[in-house]
Image: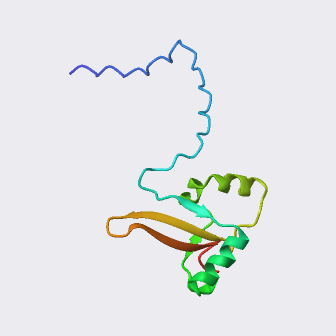
Amino acid sequence: MSPTPSKRARPASKRARVETPPKPVRPFVAHHLVPPHEILSEAESQATLAELKVSPERLPRILVTDPGLQTDPKYAGLREVREPLNGRLVRIRRPSSTAGEAIAYRIIASDLGE
């Protein structure tokens, strides 16, 4: 029996490894199935709550980090000026085969425990 030849390690590549620069951050592009979200102003929020005759505590919540909020062009501007978004009202317009358009409202929360 002849001894098995030892496997030699592959020599390192002679080409210098070129580091690729990081990819630029793409602006948010909404998926076509995400309905448009609209952050309402304080005045619009109060008028809508009065029209619906409901208190903000009774509305479902949406996280401030929800990607759907990024479909509103005002969202980036509000985040940039660091305006507090907690407690703001969001209008979500969904297409409906029976009603044409279904509108839902959510209250922005920093976490769901609020």
Q: Position of residue 11 (x, y in %)?
A: 47, 16
Quarter of the image for residue 87 reads bottom right
Position above or below: 39 against 56: above
Q: Residue furthest top?
A: 14
Q: Position of residue 86 (x, y in %)?
A: 69, 71
Q: Quadrant of the C terminus?
A: bottom right
Q: Is residue 65 or residue 104 the one in the foreground?
A: 104
Quarter of the image for residue 33 reads bottom left
Query: Which residue is drawn at the image coordinates 44% and 64% (left, top)?
Result: 94
Query: Which residue is drawn at the image coordinates 67% and 55% (left, top)?
Result: 74
Horizontal placement of 31 versus 85: left or right? left
Query: Which residue is drawn at the image coordinates 41% and 20% (left, top)?
Result: 8
Q: Position of residue 31 (x, y in %)?
A: 45, 50
Q: Which color scheme did the rendering employ for the protein?
A: rainbow
Quarter of the image for residue 26 reads top right
Position above or below: 21 against 30: above
Query: Which residue is drawn at the image coordinates 57% and 20% (left, top)?
Result: 17
